[in-house]
């Protein structure tokens, strides 16, 4: 196994693990660093993993050897032998006092005391959560402090404002009146536009309210708007359903219907349920109204309305004639 291939496998493992041990040589460690800004270079760095090297961790944990054996489909012992050969080459380079560059990892060398030094490679981020995020360099913002300079200049050089000398026959006086006239016209036009916008807004609100009323009227029709084909009904019998008591002025309305046939059907349904339902008449929209019951006392009517809302229909409402 060549040294370059071994570096490739170590680099792949560092994306998944924070420690990769090379048997009898050392371990590459990766620790996370938060995003930061270099104020001197005006550079923003994304979160990353920074590599370090520890020459004391030389015991074989089996991670690197097993990974290479599985990738190359060979035996564990064969891979371990090849790694030992590559490590021997690395040690020979370092003992000569030369630097050992490792692709995607960094550079190793011995210092004057014979200790291993390591400089990580630049431009490689092993933090998968920051994939695709490189460092960003921005130009510094240069703010001109002009106010202090003007103040200092005013203290040294006084400013003298001389009156304007107008030539005879110029149109400057008339320009003043023209500007005033133009300002008046502009103000009037702006006010007219604001008035038109308010009028348009009022019309839209009125139209929206009318649409909501129409919608509520349509929702009040409980049955199909198509008239039912029913046998002829005696008008006198329907009229007799309307309350005759002069003192029953509080009616609990069950619904309003566009067609009278639907109102009659609702009356029969409510009577089957035990309510003294009756036909009240038509409202301002021409809809036929049907009542659950009617009462003389407002208190009794409210109590009955609450019970009907709770037990029968929450859409019931109270109509008082006075």
Image: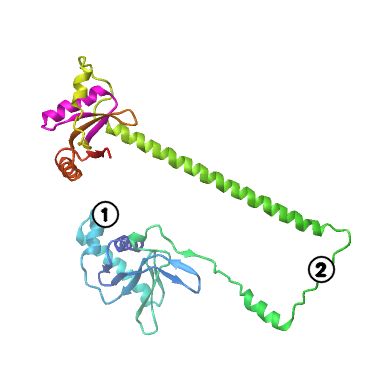
Residue 127 occupies which quadrant of the picture? bottom left
Q: Which residue matches tag 1?
A: 72
Between residue 93 and residue 260, name the one nearer to us. Answer: 260
Circle 2 Cα neighbour tier, 10 Å, few/some/many (<14 / 14–19 / ≥20) = few
Q: What element carries label 2?
A: loop
Q: What element carries label 1?
A: helix
Q: Is residue 157 above or below residue 120?
A: below
Q: Which residue is drawn at 21% across and 65% down?
A: 62
Q: Which residue matches tag 2?
A: 164
Q: Would residue 2 be seen by someone viewing this image from the given angle? A: no
Q: Position of residue 302 (x, y in %)?
A: 19, 44
Q: Position of residue 81 (x, y in %)?
A: 24, 64
Sooner in the amino-acid sequence: mark 1 or mark 2: 1
The Cα atoms of the two marked residues, 1 and 2, are separated by: 93 Å
Quadrant of the rendering where the N terminus is positioned: bottom left
Q: Give the range drawn in magenta.
A: 253-279
Between residue 165 and residue 267, name the one nearer to us. Answer: 267
Q: Residue at x 64, y 74 (%)?
A: 146
The verdict on residue 274 being magenta is: yes
Q: Residue at x 61, y 75 (%)?
A: 145
Circle 1 Cα neighbour tier, 10 Å, few/some/many (<14 / 14–19 / ≥20) = few
Q: Which residue is drawn at 70% across and 83% down?
A: 155
């Amino acid at each position: 196994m060549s040294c370059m291939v071994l570096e490739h496998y170590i680099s792949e493992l560092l994306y998944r693990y924070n420690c990769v041990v090379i048997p009898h040589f050392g371990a590459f460690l990766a620790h996370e660093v938060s995003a930061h800004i270099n104020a001197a270079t005006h550079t923003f760095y994304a979160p990353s993993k920074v590599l370090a090297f520890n020459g004391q961790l030389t015991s074989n944990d089996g991670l690197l050897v097993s990974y290479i054996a599985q990738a190359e489909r060979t035996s564990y012992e064969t891979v371990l032998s090849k790694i030992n050969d590559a490590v021997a080459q690395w040690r020979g380079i370092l003992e000569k006092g030369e630097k050992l560059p490792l692709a995607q990892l960094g550079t190793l060398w011995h210092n004057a005391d014979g200790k291993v030094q390591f400089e990580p490679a630049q431009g490689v981020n092993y933090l998968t959560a920051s994939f695709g995020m490189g460092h960003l360099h921005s130009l510094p913002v240069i703010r001109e402090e002009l106010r202090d300079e003007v103040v200092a200049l005013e203290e040294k050089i006084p400013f003298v404002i001389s009156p304007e000398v107008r030539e005879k026959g110029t149109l400057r006086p008339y320009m003043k009146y023209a500007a005033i006239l133009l300002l008046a016209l502009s103000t009037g036009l702006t006010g007219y536009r604001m008035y038109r916008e308010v009028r348009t807004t009022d019309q839209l609100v009125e139209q929206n309210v009318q649409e909501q009323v129409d919608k509520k009227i349509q929702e009040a029709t409980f049955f199909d708007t198509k008239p039912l084909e029913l046998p002829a009904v005696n008008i006198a019998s329907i009229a007799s359903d309307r309350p005759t008591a002069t003192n029953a002025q509080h009616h609990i309305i069950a619904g309003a219907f566009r067609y009278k046939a639907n109102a009659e059907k609702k009356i029969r349904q409510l009577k089957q349920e035990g309510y003294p339902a009756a036909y009240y008449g038509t409202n301002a929209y021409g809809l036929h109204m049907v009542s659950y019951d009617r009462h003389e006392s407002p208190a009794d009517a409210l109590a009955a309305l609450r019970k009907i809302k709770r037990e029968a229909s929450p859409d019931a409402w109270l109509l008082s004639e006075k």
